[in-house]
Image (cartoon, rainbow, N blue to C red):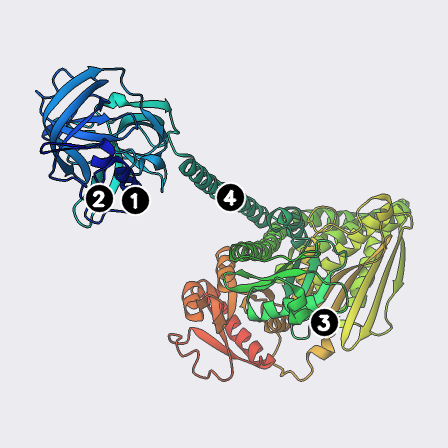
Amino acid sequence: MATGRLARGTLAALALFCLAGATLAQERVALEEAEARSAPDFTPTLEDREVLVSGQISGRPVWIADAFYAAIQDEASYGLLLKAGAKQLDGLEPGDWVEAEGTISNRAGSPILISRQVRKLRHAAPPAPVALSASQVNSYRYMGVLVTVENIVSGEDRNSGGDLLLIGEDGESLNIFLPRTRRDSGPQLAGFRVGDRIRVTGIASQYCTLPPFDRYFQVLIGSPAAVATLERGWFIQPPVLLASLILAAALAAIWWIRERRMAGLRKQMRLLNALGEQVVGATSPAEILRRLTLNLPALSHASDVGLYIQNRGAKVLEGMLSKGSQALIVDPEAPSGAIASAVSTSFRSRTLIAIHDTRHSPFWRDETTPTPRSALFVPMLAQSELMGVLEMHHSKRFHYFSHSEQAAMQHLANQIATALKLQEQHSMREQLFRSEKLAATGQLISDVANELRSPLESIAMLASTLRSREPGAPRAELDSIAGEAKRASEIVGRLVSFARVETSEVAPVDLHALLSGLLKFRAPEWKVKGVEIKTQLAGSRAVVMGSSGQLEQVLLNLLVDAEKSAAEAAEKTITIATSLLANRVLVEITYSVRSAEGHRAEPADTDHGSGALGLGVCRGIVESHGGEFRIVHTSPTQARFDIELPLASGRRAGAADIGEPTRQLTVLVVEPDVKAQRQLVQLLGNRGDRVVPVSNAEEAADVVERLRFDMAICAVRLPGVNWMEFSERVRHRVGGFVLLRDALNGDTGRAFPGSEGLVLSRPIDETELYRICRTVEERTTLIAGD
């Protein structure tokens, strides 16, 4: 309808964009078409035209930027915004029906009526807000209408015009806009967080920016009271909370796994350190293997452990397994079997070998017997000196030996090697200590025996005098007195000879005569104890070169020890037999033992008891004479001492006659080669000299600090130190320093100042060695004379 210059129309028609129409039917059709398409220029249909509209005020006016805006709507729920001054809207309340006159315009894309005059027609109940969803508000249909929307807060923002609150999800999002009344005022839509469910009551409108014409729909509210919180959301959104929990659980799992792994490593390190201390404190290889068997399964879950220790004399590896009763012998040059091949390879290359799966290992390629699933072979090194190989394996399952486990096992193997080296040094120190102890005991015995000799000789002389002067004297008693005195004098003489072992000279010794004398000497004692003696001596003479006193002392000590064991056995028998073979003589002393009743099955290697020497010292004396000493267990109730010595005739064959030695020398041999070391010990032992063999310079320096040596024979190549450095350390503490060089190193030895040092070439010539010994004898004799 139109009146005068005014175009009277409905609110639905005035709210349309880019349309023209006069009748209500046309306006409704145009409204439907406008909702179906977008307006390219966002221009209201009646823009710049004078209109007169009527409607009911739906809410209180809202101040936006520079003016008040009031929303009116009709009975069909179509609405329009009025831009009016404060005086025009004074006294109007929600529910008033008004008639407004003015010009159609737009504000940020929304059609508005810039009113010149607003007249109140009547008052009625305020219109109820239309309950809509966010997607319904996002349309032109309800622009300018009082609506209420419920949804979840998804964000907040601010701009120059006021505060924004975003509700709904993507595709159904909607802005809640609260204009700012002053430029310096703070945020008004505060206290809401993402996830809160709210109810908003306000005017539906549209906001369009400048090109490129980004537009969005919004709900215009006049105060924060228009927003009511229905349900508080999560402080942390469920997706974020779930992601955080998953991340926290993952981090906790990683931390727990790491801590468990670190705890396991710390436990392994504690066990490894404790095992290393136990190994270093062990007294024998068997004790080391026992401690490894008890502790290694906790470190690596190994099913079996083996120690393969180098025997330098036989040039083999002697193996001991934790679950094996028999010792294994491995020849590094010709191994037999998969494990022996791996052990020898690790030994020769001085390299750790880790076999994670034996099915793919070349060592087990042709093996038909049951084999372990994985194995580890570790060389045992003590300051670069190879002592053997540590072997461990898993019988039933595959096992990957990590780098840390390999490093730990190498560290343990080196500690085992150090323990074995310490055991060797301890054994040598014990032997030296026993020798010193024996020397002190012998000196005491010599002093006592010298004091007893004169009274015993006087008793024998007085008995003989009385028998010759007094015809009626009891001759039987006097003969008994003289015989016992003579026997006591012989015992004292033997004690004196034992005490003079250190000063005895080398001479031919008839072992048969020596054994006969000892058997006669001990016969009374054996008769009292009920011990039966059986002799099986060879028919020919058994002459060896050596110290008669030393050999007699060794044989007597072994006979006394055999006597003690036989006296406690059920069958009290001792058998002494000798045999000659290949220029060597073998002395066998077989005796009974009480092993079946729980007593000791072998004689103890100790200095206590009736014997003058321990078995260790006896072994050293026999070896210094170029022989061998063995203890053999022939049965549970029988054992045997074996002494094998070279015959005198074989010794001098092919050797130059350089005369007999004038005095016994104490010689230190520093030679890492076991074969050359044993050759020197045998040659010097044949001469009657005392020999102390060592394998490296550190041991030699330690021995020189404790004993005085007449001569030191040192190899050119020593492990860990140069021979010249060793010479500087010890040459002023020994009578003569002899350098053992190779034949190719002709210039070696010129470093000696003046004529202080002597040189001996390989291969060792017996005549040259004895000539050097004679030179050292002459030097020491001159020094003693001065």
> Relative to 203, does residue 762 appear above or below in the rendering?
below
Q: Earlier in the sequence, mark 3 or mark 1?
A: 1
Secondary structure of the residue carrying numbered label 3: loop
> What's the CA distance linking mark 4 and mark 1?
67 Å
> What's the CA distance linking mark 2 and mark 1?
9 Å
Labelled disc at residue 336: 3
Local crowd size for mark 4, using a 10 Å CA cut-off: few (<14), some (14–19), many (≥20)? few
Residue 235 lies left or right of residue 422; in this view the side is: left
Q: Nearer the viewer, mark 4 or mark 1?
A: 1
Q: Nearer the viewer, mark 2 or mark 3?
A: 2
Labelled disc at residue 19: 2
Q: Earlier in the sequence, mark 2 or mark 4?
A: 2
Question: What amino acid is at disc 1?
Answer: Glu
Local crowd size for mark 1, using a 10 Å CA cut-off: few (<14), some (14–19), many (≥20)? few
Q: Which quadrant is home to the N terminus? A: top left
According to the image, label 4 marks what residue?
257
Q: Are marks 2 and 1 in contact (CB under 8 Å)?
A: yes
According to the image, label 1 marks what residue?
33
> What's the CA distance linking mark 2 and mark 3?
107 Å
Question: What amino acid is at disc 2?
Answer: Leu
Labelled disc at residue 425: none
Q: Earlier in the sequence, mark 4 or mark 1?
A: 1
Q: Earlier in the sequence, mark 2 or mark 3?
A: 2
Local crowd size for mark 3, using a 10 Å CA cut-off: few (<14), some (14–19), many (≥20)? few
The location of residue 598, given as percent across then percent down, is: 83, 44
Q: Earlier in the sequence, mark 2 or mark 1?
A: 2
Q: Are marks 2 and 4 in contact (CB under 8 Å)?
A: no
> What's the CA distance linking mark 4 and mark 3?
44 Å
